[in-house]
């Protein structure tokens, strides 16, 4: 896997992070575990989890999230964090990739 690219930290509940990890592995997106400080528990998630993905474009992360939303039950919130800022994407199995991409581009974090 090519590990050159932008490192994006993704934070959510453990079910969503597990789904992102599975999709990333299938799509050959490099990932690594992320340690979450206690301050990241502010999401109100009982089991907050994180992963770092190495991506090359905002479209790549939008596709990854769209596929992950299809694997989880119900409405989920996933926060993307980069050195330029963060954005929380809320979605479910019906959330389209272009909707996710528009939110990422509007936040101007990638």
Image (cartoon, grey):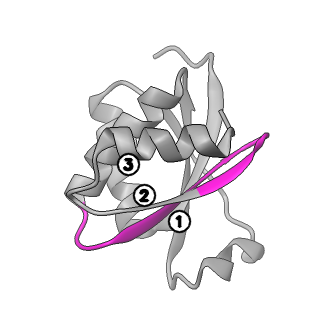
**Residue 24 image point, x, y percent:** 37, 36
**Quadrant location of the C terminus in the rendered image:** top right
The span shown in magenta is 72-87
Asked whether, in this view, residue 72 is left or right of residue 15, the answer is left
Measured from the top left, where is residue 87 in percent x and y? 62, 55
Point out the image quarter for the N terminus.
top left
What secondary structure do most residues of the magenta stretch adopt? strand
Q: Tell me how far mark 1 sits from mark 3, CA to CA.
A: 11 Å
Q: Which residue is mark 2?
A: 17
Q: Looking at the rendering, which quadrant does residue 40 occupy?
A: bottom right
x, y percentage for residue 53?
53, 37
Q: Which dot marks residue 49? A: 1
* Residue 52 in the image: above or below residue 90: above
| Residue sitting at x 67%, y 58% | 35
Which residue is drawn at the image coordinates 69% and 52% (left, top)?
86
Label 1 with label 3: CB-CB less than 8 Å: no
Pointer 3 and pointer 2: residues touching (CB < 8 Å)? yes
Q: Which residue is mark 3?
A: 20
Whether 87 is drawn above or below 73: the answer is: above
Give the mark nearer the N terminus: 2 vs 1.
2
Of residues 93 and 47, which is closer to you in this image?
93
How far is the residue under mark 3 from the one under mark 2? 5 Å
């Amino acid at each position: 896997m090519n590990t050159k690219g932008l490192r994006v930290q993704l934070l959510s509940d453990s079910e969503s992070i597990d789904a992102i990890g599975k999709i990333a592995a299938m799509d050959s997106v490099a990932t690594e575990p992320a340690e979450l400080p206690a301050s990241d528990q502010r999401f109100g998630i009982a089991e907050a989890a994180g992963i770092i993905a190495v991506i090359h474009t905002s479209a790549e992360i939008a596709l990854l999230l769209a596929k992950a939303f299809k694997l989880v039950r119900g409405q989920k919130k996933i926060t993307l964090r980069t050195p330029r800022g963060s954005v929380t994407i809320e979605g479910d199995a019906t959330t389209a990739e272009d909707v996710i991409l528009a939110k990422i581009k509007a936040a101007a974090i990638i």
